Image (cartoon, grey):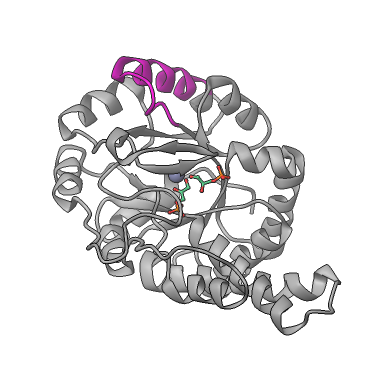
Amino acid sequence: MPLVNTTEMFKKAYEGGYAIGAFNVNNMEIIQGITEAAKSLNAPLILQVSAGARKYANHTYLVKLVEAALAVTDLPIALHLDHGDTFELCKDCIDGGFTSVMIDGSHHSYEGNVELTKKVVEYAHARGVTVEAELGRLAGIEDDVSVSAEDASYTNPDQVVDFVTRTGCDSLAIAIGTSHGAFKFKPGTKPQLRFDILEEIERRLPGFPIVLHGASSVIPEFVDDINKFGGKMDHAIGIPEDMLRQAARSAVCKINIDSDLRLAMTASIRKYFAENPSHFDPRQYLSPARTAIKDMVARKITNVLGCDGKA
Ligand code: G3H
Ligand code: 13P
Ligand code: ZN
């Protein structure tokens, strides 16, 4: 099966009350771990590549690795640009084989965001590529750019119909309290998502796919393992899995997860070296790391997304 765009998978997810996992990929082991989990659970998948991932691994390597995963798994997989911030970056990815792009104009003025998104949509749609846009601004870290909690802002439901109509985007990332990175809420605080805003957006845009970024749960046992085996990480509260499951049953059709994979992989490698200090063959420590990614993705598919059996 060739790479697909997100149209069909979002339509089915919306109607079926589940969400597709969008997992960030940076190397072969991450791609293998994610796709092996999806294959074992027969789940549709979005593999997403950030500007940082392209810089690290090289566009062509990532596309070829994803093509290999596709050949091996035969699942519906979309290859998506995560947080594209310019028309040129989106164009590069569209011309270079991606089937979906995000244009993140959330740092621009409202009118600037509309104008940039519209330009990307025109280019993408002419080539069969779907476009995710963002309205509202999440806190946290993206590509080493830190957005403070004060600069973050919830999506304004009054703007969504105008934005979607004028831009023609295919899905909309919204800000309802999730944030990027492994430090979302301070320990001891109670995480809250603005489900009232989500419901209002759903009411105003019936049938339209909504996206949640910053949706890692920062599961304590992985931070514990990192610290137990020589790391030094502060604990934080992530987005509880039951809240994400609730979101996945609504208009939310795509849930972005990266930090939880990073934590699982790092915990596994630290544990391996603590237990096998004399080993130096990368295959030895990357095999369990790949399995850790696979287990984490399988957990997300069943506990959070509900997309098992939907491929
Ligand atoms: O939202 C950002 C993703 O976690 C990707 O992170 O830009 O460090 O690759 P990155
Ligand atoms: P997390 O940092 O919560 O995993 O979010 C990832 C993300 O939104 C990628 O776009
Ligand atoms: Zn994001």
Residue closer to the observer: 219 or 44: 219
Q: Is residue 195 above or below residue 53?
A: below
State the residue in front, 104 or 79: 104
Magenta segment, prevailing SS (helix, strand or loop): helix
Residue drawn at (51%, 55%), measured in percent from left and top?
258
Q: Quadrant of residue 53?
A: top right
Q: Is residue 131 above or below residue 306?
A: above
In this rendering, the answer to whether 208 lies above or below 217 is above
Residue ID at (54%, 39%): 144
Q: How many marks?
A: 0
Would residue 20 be found to the left or right of residue 296 on screen? left
- Nearest the camera: 254 or 283? 283
Which quadrant is the N terminus positioned in?
A: bottom right
Decide whether residue 87 is among the magenta residues.
no
| Residue 305 picture location, percent across and down | 38, 64
Determine if the magenta segment contains residue 114: yes
Q: Residue at horizontal 35%, vertical 52%?
A: 253
Report if residue 104 is visible in the image. yes
Percent position (x, y) of residue 273? 73, 76
Q: Height in image: 83 above or below 183?
A: above
Q: Is residue 192 left or right of residue 216?
A: left
Q: Position of residue 43 (x, y in %)?
A: 50, 65
Q: Residue furthest bottom?
A: 275
Give the residue drawn at x 22%, y 63%.
190
Residue 309 visible in the picture = no
Q: Position of residue 39 (x, y in %)?
A: 59, 69
Residues rendered magenta in the picture: 104-123
